[in-house]
Image: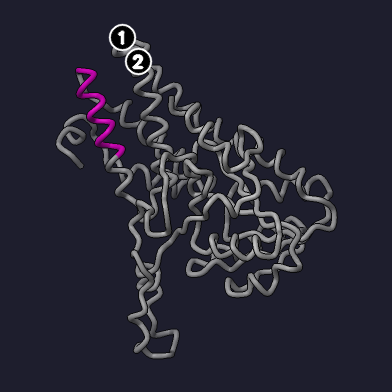
Amino acid sequence: MSSVLAQNVVFNVKKYFHDLMASDEDISMPVAAILTLVEVIKQSKASTMSEFMEMLEDASLSLKSSTRNFISLSAGCDLYMRFVTRTIHDLSDFEACKNHLIERGKLFKQKAIDCRQSIASLGCQFIKDDATILIHSYSRVVMLLLLQAASQKKRFKVYVTESRPLSQGLEAAKILRKAGVPTTVILDSAVGYIMEKVDAVIVGAEGVVENGGVINQIGTYQLAIVAKTANKPFYVVAESFKFVRLFPLNQYDLPTITPTTLSFDDIDQPKDTDELDEAAYVAKNPCVDYTPPEYITLLFTDIGVLTPSGVSDELIKLHY
């Protein structure tokens, strides 16, 4: 924590953020980041506007260094910092400005819930009776979309990738089965095998970049390639606050704390899986990948159904 931040707040920014994430399973990283910045403002002892801004910028940088994959967290921080800058220009009174920022920040959590509901209502229109849907890993907004479609008595079945190494697809399958949706977990390596049985692929996003491509859990890119080859629609569902001002050119152009290439140094380790260090595998492999816009059919967002080419226009509206 920088000296400016340490002097002006009396709590640990990283701890507060991680406590928020742990206490509410429905909260997403961008929302938790914004609520953390709101708490920084509430506890700030800054006496000047310049000191106040420097403190928030320090807190934002501290948050971005608090997690291995900070793409969506960064989107939330940048969006809120842009709102802070606008508010400072509009309100000259320092205390009034702080109070306004706190109140608007508190409303953001409810807005995020409304965003997901809006996306679910929009996206479930694309799920037809007797459809077979393939999803990847676990995404809150994808789950809400499918559960809403099920609540409308639509009959469909789901394949979900196991999504190694964290196996988050198992949690998605558990929730869908409980809701009465026929769900089968498949190996990540079985995507090509199962694709011809699929009517559509639906994935979430950690971030939506300027060219309309998406950054998401590792394996999304290969899923998109197979879907494109099989001529299957590839849909992305994402809240607009995950739109991020990045323009990656390839897989190794992502600003994440991940290896630049896969690690194969475990070849000589014992074949007994009980002796292998799971944490080491996670640390040595990337946690997200980049899917270019040419593989994406449509994006379902709280601001409407977008083609990848329409994302840059919406980013301009959000940030300027």
Give the x, y percent position of residue 217: 50, 58
Give amino acid for label 2.
Answer: Cys
Give the x, y percent position of residue 71: 41, 47
Q: Which mark is residue 93?
A: 1
Dot 2 and dot 1 residues touching (CB under 8 Å): yes
Q: Is residue 282 above or below residue 269?
A: above
Give the x, y percent position of residue 117: 65, 37
Q: Is residue 58 above or below residue 126?
A: above
Q: Residue furthest left?
A: 3
Could you classify mark 2 by the number of other residues whose Cα lies within 10 Å: few (under 14), some (14-19), or many (20 or more)? Answer: some
Q: Nearer the viewer, residue 260 or 97?
A: 260
Q: Quadrant of the N terminus?
A: top left
Q: Which mark is residue 97?
A: 2
Q: Nearer the viewer, residue 60 or 134?
A: 134
Q: Nearer the viewer, residue 239 or 35?
A: 239
Residue 51 magenta: yes
* The residue stretch that appears in magenta: 48-60
Residue 259 image-quadrant placement = bottom left
Residue 265 seen in render:
yes
Residue 174 seen in render:
no
Q: Callout 2: helix, strand or loop?
A: helix
Residue 312 magenta: no
Q: Is residue 39 above or below residue 97?
A: below
In the figure, is residue 150 to the left or right of 87? right
Give amino acid for label 1.
Answer: Asp
> Which residue does the image show at 38% across and 59% down from the upper left?
252
Magenta highlight: main SS: helix
Distance CA(mark 2)–CA(mark 1): 6 Å
> Which residue does the image show at 50% across and 54% down from the upper left?
216
Q: Quadrant of the C terminus?
A: top left
